[in-house]
Image (spheres, rainbow, N blue to C red):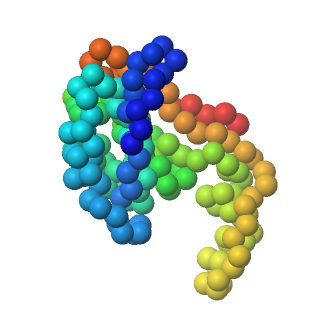
Amino acid sequence: MVVVAASNGVDCAIMNLQGRTYMPQTDCPFRKADRILAELPETVRVRFLDFHAELTSEKMAIGWYLDGRVSAVIGTHTHIPTADTRILPNGTAYQTDVGMTGPYHSVIGVDKSIALQKFLTQMPVRMEAAKHGAELHAVIVEIDEQTGRAAGIRRYTVS
């Protein structure tokens, strides 16, 4: 976690936590989020969580768990953007997965022919990045700096 001043001078807490299912072992991200938030000064109202996890259910669960305590929960890791962009009832902006920045004429960034070879043969192959179709996927979150609640969220793509 890091606290940085935005261009308008507002302090923003940026947190990155990792899920546990099908990922390397880490501390419980739910309990870790509780500890981080307990240590943040009340004056830091803008709180953004990048949640790096495999399962959509784990991402959704932490979104509900932190609703109203953070400004945004944005999932990463699975490379494919989800269409569930919304503001949860207590003011947390949420999207299960923001997607990736990289070559979308691919299989999650890997050259299509190599990925297909692996699926068709079930043999190990050397993964190589695809070279075409670069896209940037992101979200733009508007946050009320007085309350820390999300005022808006929208998907953003550059291709």
Identified at 36% across, 69% down, the residue is 25
Answer with left or right where residue 14 lies relative to residue 106. Answer: left
Identified at 50% across, 43% down, the residue is 98
Tally the numbered discs: 0
**Of 56 and 120, the residue lying toward us:** 56
Quarter of the picture containing the N terminus is top left
> In x, y percent, where is residue 107?
64, 61
- Asked if 146 appears above or below 72 in the picture, the reply is above
Identified at 66% across, 33% down, the residue is 158
Quarter of the picture containing the C terminus is top right
Is any atom of residue 76 visible in this view? Answer: yes
Image quarter of residue 11: top left
Identified at 26% across, 59% down, the residue is 28
Answer with left or right where residue 13 lies relative to residue 130. Answer: left
Is any atom of residue 154 visible in this view? Answer: no
> In x, y percent, where is residue 67?
24, 36
> In x, y percent, where is residue 86?
36, 32
> In x, y percent, where is residue 51?
39, 48
Image quarter of residue 53: bottom left
Image quarter of residue 151: top left
